[in-house]
């Protein structure tokens, strides 16, 4: 997978803050680029893909950060 252009550090932030941060920062990357959300909140595993689907963006999948925290990767489509 291509490295994300931007990674949001949402470690320790509870639902719905990771997706709120994603919504605020999706415009920080160009169309076609990836943005990742590093989140410790288990709800992010469901929330990030759902947010991407509802907003017409592409959910790419889940990776793991160097510290073991899940990274949820989204491709900006519009």
Image (cartoon, rainbow, N blue to C red):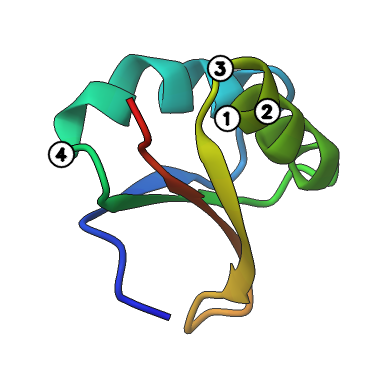
Q: CA distance from mark 3 to mark 4?
A: 16 Å
Choose the circle earlier in sequence order: 4 or 2: 4
Q: Residue at x 60, y 74 (%)?
A: 63
Choose the circle earlier in sequence order: 3 or 4: 4
Task: Tell me the number on the disc at residue 53.
Answer: 2
Instruction: Name the side, left or right, on which 71 lies relative to 66.
Output: right
Instruction: Name the side, left or right, on which 54 lies relative to 4.
Output: right
Do tag 2 and tag 3 residues touch (Cβ < 8 Å)? yes
Report which residue position mark 3 lands on: 55
Do tag 2 and tag 1 residues touch (Cβ < 8 Å)? no
Choose the circle earlier in sequence order: 1 or 4: 1
Camera-side residue of 71 and 50: 50
Q: Nearer the viewer, mark 1 or mark 3?
A: 3
Q: Is residue 26 above or below residue 55?
A: below
Do tag 3 and tag 4 residues touch (Cβ < 8 Å)? no
Choose the circle earlier in sequence order: 2 or 1: 1
Report which residue position mark 1 lands on: 18
Report which residue position mark 4 lands on: 30
Q: CA distance from mark 4 to mark 2?
A: 18 Å
Instruction: Name the side, left or right, on which 5 lies relative to 71.
Output: left
Q: Residue at x 45, y 28 (%)?
A: 22
Label 4 crowd (10 A; few <14 / some 14-19 / many >=20): some
Q: Residue at x 22, y 23 (%)?
A: 27
Q: CA distance from mark 1 to mark 4?
A: 20 Å
Camera-side residue of 32 and 67: 32
Helix, strand or loop status at disc 3? loop
């Amino acid at each position: 997978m291509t490295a994300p252009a931007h990674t949001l550090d949402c470690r320790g932030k509870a639902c719905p803050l990771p997706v709120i941060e994603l919504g605020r920062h999706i415009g920080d990357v160009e169309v076609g680029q990836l943005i990742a959300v590093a989140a410790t909140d288990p709800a992010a595993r469901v929330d990030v893909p759902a947010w991407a689907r509802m907003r017409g963006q592409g959910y790419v999948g889940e990776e793991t950060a160097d510290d073991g925290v899940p990274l949820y990767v989204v491709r900006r489509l519009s």
